[in-house]
Image (cartoon, grey):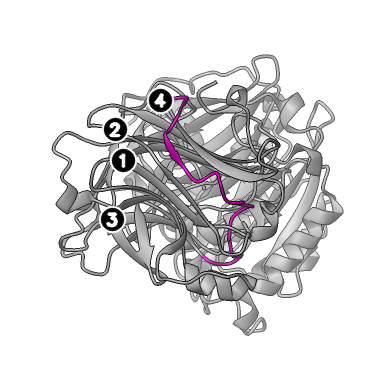
Amino acid sequence: MAAAYLTGCNSSTSSGGSPTPSKVDFKFAVLPDTQKYSENSPERFDAQTQWIADNWAQENIPFTFHLGDIVEDRRIDSEWVAADHAMSLLEGGNTPYSILCGNHDLLNQGADDGRNLAEEPFFDWFPESRMQQDPTYMGRCPTGFNSYHIFEASNGQKFLSLAMDWRPSESSIAWAQSILDQHSDIPTILSTHQLINIAGDGESPLVTNQGVEFFTDLIYNNDQIFLTLNGHHHGASSLVAYNKYGREVLMVVVDYQSMFWGGNGLMRTVGFDYTNKKMVMRSFSPYVMEKIAAGIPLNSQDELDLTDTINHFDFPMDFDFRFNDLNNEDNINAGPAGVAGTRAHWLLDKERMIVRESDKNQLLFQDLSGQGNHLAMKGFENNMLGNTSYFDMSSDSPGLGYANGSMLFLGDKRDMVGVYLETSGITLSDSDFKGEGFTIEAFIKLPNGWDYDQGGWGGILCHQISRSQAAKELDLAGSGGDPSIVLATSTLRELQFEALSHDSGNVHRSWSWDLGVDSWHHVAVVNRRDESKGHMITEMFVDGALTMRNETDKSLDGLAAVNGFNWTIGASSWDGKVDNPLIGYVSEVRIVDRPLDESEWLTA
């Protein structure tokens, strides 16, 4: 999953007489974790929902999203009474809302299909009969913990709210997919309790394990999901992911419970400015507004609105484009360059980097081709230090292609330590290339101080399966523990490409010259039919120049790529196991299932 950080440094907060104004066509209201209010301060919860009830027409608020953790202790009735009263203020007919369970609301916090529904208090206070009084309510899943609404904004745009439990089961995910399939043309907001988290700096987003599941199971494949909202993690942050159609999905986490008095009534609105083509995020406290209106002096902790760039920002979005032609398979993204036949495309820069919560040192990089071949960071088994000791995210880039930085791999084959990026069951297979040719491109730079003992034969791109195993899987001639496909750096700082082909086990072999250090290079390996020879050949080009050593006398048709076997960036392999870590910068890698003319290369 790829991301661009939308957060910035903390700045001032406001305690004036009214929230920072914003002109929008309409806005959604968002109620993050209200548990502290239900437990200790119902008046702050009431202030939030009363403000929505009083101002929905003036503010053009068609819908409200509650993000779970309705109460602090699901076993205490008085907390549910407080939440019941606050939410009832929205039930006058003009202020529909969705509501879902967070971990604090559940007796059984595991998967929703493993709970005893008769024992869960959520259904005592928010039964389906209550939700059915809302005309936007469309139904719940069989477990009852997931629901959806369809509502209409003041400009006539319809939206679907998909409110998901904090731990949806496989059956509930399938139910959600069925709803999305039935309404594939309606822009959708996915709300849940946990999806993205916040790093220790208080700004940068982290993707939770649950978030990865939501992304791969629902967000990536369903073009209509353009916005996700979650709470659970204290503070606020946001990131951008890209679905398989190449379109942006803004993912937002907001939860003020760790602040003064559990948030002191702070809530969020999401505005839609069609004129200026942007979403407008604002956070403010109706409770503080009430104090000001009543002439009650504010204390040092009362904040009317938050004006730091984490809580107060605009996100560009052309709604006419984003909400139209949804889920059109003809629009599946071919990567930033829009090159037909792109099977994988990775940009290894900070803008496309996502940090996974389960391991603060684990990065994710999304495949931009629309094929779902995402990369996750792995560490070598011999690593004695954390992953951060073996890589660096650099602003250094070649100035060509689409990356705005690069990843510096700092492995050492002497101790067999380092990190690499690995796909999980990549969708590439031999049939993608047989008879059609291919193009593999990468931008690579060897750093000053590069040493052959440390980095010789380091893998840039590698298909981990060995030649012997690939030959067996594809019924080809060929043997040996070398990877079936590899682009690597030799001990003489040359680029080496070797790959098993479909022609009687013939092997593609191409070599560059000594590339030296501290200089970016573009490599393109192109497999095409040479009419003068009457067969397929493979040639390597470095910085646009044909290299001298290419195997062209033998027929070399396609690649021995085996579906389901991993590919890596930053390491080679031996006998199917990762080997020979890379020392070098990599900014971008692309695989295309046809021979590209130079005019279509990443350098064009």
Q: Is residue 560 magenta?
A: yes
Instruction: Give the residue pinned by disc 4.
Output: 307
Q: Which mark is drawn over residue 581? A: 3
- What element does badge 3 sit on? strand
Q: Is residue 198 left or right of residue 46?
A: left
Q: In the image, is residue 273 part of the stretch drawn in magenta? A: no
- Residue shown at 66%/81% (left/top)? 117
What amino acid is labelled 3 in the image? Pro
Q: How far apart are marks 3 and 2 (CA)?
A: 18 Å
Q: Which mark is residue 515?
A: 2
Tell me the distance, in whole angstroms, between the alpha carbons under discs 3 and 4.
45 Å
**Which residue is located at x 50 percent, y 46 percent?**
551
The three-letter amino acid code for the residue at tag 1 is: Glu
Which mark is on residue 132?
none
Res 404 → quadrant: top left
- Disc nearer the start of the sequence (2/4): 4
Q: Quadrant of residue 560?
A: bottom right
